[in-house]
């Protein structure tokens, strides 16, 4: 094998029922079930070239050489691919996002889903989507969900994600309000481990999360935004409550985050069905019907501190092209 390359594009996903906490840190298995919506318009493009002339992996992320933990996580996925291929081959990886990286917009989810799929193609492995999902999960649990489009679930302790419903079957919009620039203050893995180790609210979060997940899943299957929205907000707020009580506290919210949340509540008070969620970061994502998406976007753009607004439809499965 001299050289073989593959390119994959995967979209970010935003959890409606949140994942926060690890049941098994070494295997990177989630402590709670989660359900997400994959989003068109927030994508990672990754090219992996396996070259027998290489003596080590070469990795560039958003145009810069990867270092430290970012490099280690990519190499970890490549090591798994080498084991599956049964050959000590190295790869050249180039990956870029069309949205801010490491800021709470699920760039690790789309990034590692794209890496797993492109890597499998470049190493000449014919993996089923579930196997690609399991491979991506080892680097980022939420990446397991970005292998699939539409509404996707990752059960507690699961190796891989599963599709719950296609995006076309319940074509909501996610209106994303970017409320800060640059990387977030605390990485997700560090935040989860600190919350689990120090927050008195972590165990109640883990115990209650399956109930909220079931409510989210049922509302998705019923295509009922009115039932889905309150469960989505409850999941996000309870996850953040567990972080607030960590030592030291983990607070991702900015004044603009709070202002955007209030703007959504004001819209609802005026009769627009819109519901917010926040991941481990300062940005606010708002779930709404397609007919209301423009009004939601206008309200968020008018909110002090909101830097940019992106309206996203449900996104597709990750795609692969072998060169």
Image (cartoon, grey):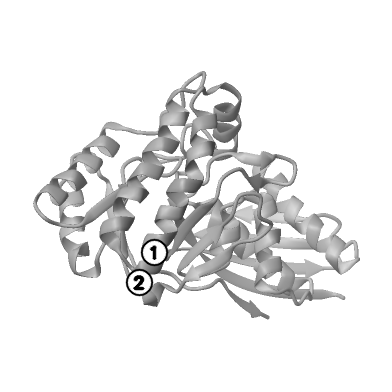
Return the mark for residue 220.
1
**Disc 2, disc 1: CB below 8 Å?**
yes
Locate residue 308 relative to residue 217 in the image: left or right: left
Residue 30: image location, x then y, percent: 62, 46
Q: Which of 304 and 246 lies nearest the eye of the viewer?
A: 246
Distance between mark 2 and mark 1 Cα atoms: 8 Å
Q: Which of 244 and 202 lies nearest the eye of the viewer?
A: 202
Residue 38: image location, x then y, percent: 45, 64
Locate residue 265 relative to residue 95 in the image: left or right: left
Kind of element beneath mark 2: loop
Q: In this view, does 68 lie above or below 17?
A: above
Q: In this view, does 252 lie above or below 116?
A: above
Residue at horizontal 70 percent and vertical 74 percent from the top: 128
Q: Is residue 184 above or below residue 76?
A: above
Locate residue 229 relative to residue 19 in the image: left or right: left
Identify the image quadrant of residue 60.
bottom right
Residue 278: image location, x then y, percent: 38, 44
Residue at horizontal 70 percent and vertical 39 percent from the top: 25
Return the mark for residue 170.
2
Residue at horizontal 53 percent and vertical 73 percent from the top: 317
Identify the image quadrant of residue 80.
bottom right
């Amino acid at each position: 094998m001299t050289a073989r390359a593959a390119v994959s594009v995967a979209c970010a996903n935003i959890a409606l029922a949140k994942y926060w906490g690890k049941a098994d840190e070494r295997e990177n298995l989630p402590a709670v079930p989660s359900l997400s919506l994959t989003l068109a318009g927030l994508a990672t493009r990754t090219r992996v070239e396996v070259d027998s002339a290489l003596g080590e992996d070469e990795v560039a992320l958003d145009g810069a050489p990867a270092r430290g933990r970012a490099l280690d996580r990519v190499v970890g996925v490549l090591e798994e691919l080498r084991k599956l291929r049964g050959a000590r081959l190295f790869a050249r990886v180039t990956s870029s996002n069309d949205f801010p990286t490491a800021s709470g917009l699920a760039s690790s989810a789309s990034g590692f889903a794209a890496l797993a799929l492109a890597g499998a193609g470049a190493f000449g492995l014919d993996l089923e989507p579930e196997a690609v999902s399991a491979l991506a999960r080892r680097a980022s649990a939420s990446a397991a969900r970005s292998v699939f489009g539409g509404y996707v679930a990752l059960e507690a302790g699961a190796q891989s994600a599963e599709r719950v419903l296609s995006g076309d079957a319940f074509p909501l919009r996610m209106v994303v309000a970017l409320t800060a620039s640059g990387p977030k203050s605390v990485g997700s893995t560090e935040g989860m481990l600190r919350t689990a180790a120090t927050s008195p609210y972590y165990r109640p979060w883990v115990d209650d999360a399956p109930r909220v997940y079931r409510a989210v899943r049922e509302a998705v299957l019923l295509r009922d935004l009115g039932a889905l929205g309150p469960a989505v907000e409850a999941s996000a707020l309870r996850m953040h409550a567990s972080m607030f009580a960590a030592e030291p506290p983990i607070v991702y919210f900015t004044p603009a985050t709070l202002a955007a949340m209030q703007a959504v509540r004001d819209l609802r008070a005026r009769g627009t069905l819109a519901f917010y969620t926040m991941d481990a970061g300062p940005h606010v994502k708002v779930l709404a019907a397609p007919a209301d998406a423009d009004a939601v976007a206008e309200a968020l753009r008018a909110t002090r501190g909101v830097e940019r607004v992106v309206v996203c439809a449900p996104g597709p499965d990750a795609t692969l092209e072998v060169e």
